[in-house]
Image (cartoon, rainbow, N blue to C red):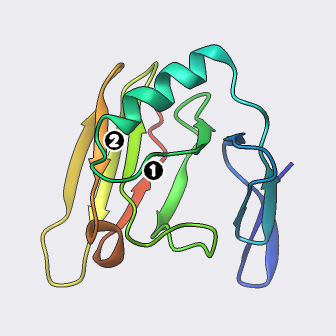
Amino acid sequence: MATVVICNKRYPVPRQVSAYGDENLTYTFSGNTLPTEPLIPILIKILKEANKFLKEVSFNYMLINRYKDGHDKIGSHKDNEKDMDPDSSIVTFSFGAERTMIFKRPNFNTVKILLKNGSVLVMNPPTNEFWYHEIPREKK
């Protein structure tokens, strides 16, 4: 199970994380390195859909975060890991229960976007450079 370090203490990552893509790729976040699993047919279809949002390059990798219920979350962050191209878009597909993605930036109003089942959210550069984003706990 992946862990994150907060104030020098390790905690389990509050969601399930897996990576799929081209062979020999890895993704490192918060000291965790995930090797990729081979893409299965349904994920190839999703990756092709994601590539429709790009102009000059195409994705060869996907990170899947599974939020099993309203207790699972991802904290406020920017996707600035060394394995990522900072000029790349981030395409988010949402399946299942609705969750809220929150965007924050100093001196700007907070933006909340409801991710409904089947919705697609595209973060084009420089969104990820300036805005933090999160999917908070939503206990119902």
Please indicate, yes or no, whether residue 140 appears anywhere in the rendered image: no
Q: Going 52% across and 61% down the picture, which residue do you hit?
A: 75
Q: Nearer the viewer, residue 10 or 118?
A: 118
What is the x, y in percent for residue 107?
15, 84
Q: Which residue is mark 1?
A: 136
Nearer the observer, 14 or 96:
96
Residue 40 visible, this orientation = yes
User: Furthest-front residue in view?
Assistant: 56
Disc tally is 2
Kindly indicate whether the residue at mark 2 contacts the one at mark 1 (C-beta within 8 angstroms).
yes
Q: Mark 1 or mark 2: which comes first in sequence?
A: 2
Q: Residues within 10 Å of mark 1 (few under 14, many from 20)?
A: some
Secondary structure at numbered mark 1? loop
Q: Nearer the viewer, residue 24 or 63?
A: 24
How crowded pointer 2 is (Cα within 10 Å; few <14, some 14-19, many 20+) is rated as some
Residue 28 location (% of width, % of height): 72, 65
The CA distance from mark 1 to mark 2 is 7 Å
Q: Position of residue 23 (x, y in %)?
A: 78, 44
> Which residue is farthest top?
41
Quadrant where the C terminus lies? Answer: top left
Q: What residue did someone put label 2 on?
A: 100
Q: Classify residue 107 as left or right of residue 68.
A: left
* Amino acid type at image mark 2: Thr
Residue 129 lies, with reference to residue 98, above or below; the image says: below
Residue placed at 46% from the left, 18% from the top?
96
Kind of residue at badge 1:
Pro
x, y percentage for residue 121?
29, 41
Q: Residue at x 30, y 26 (%)?
A: 119
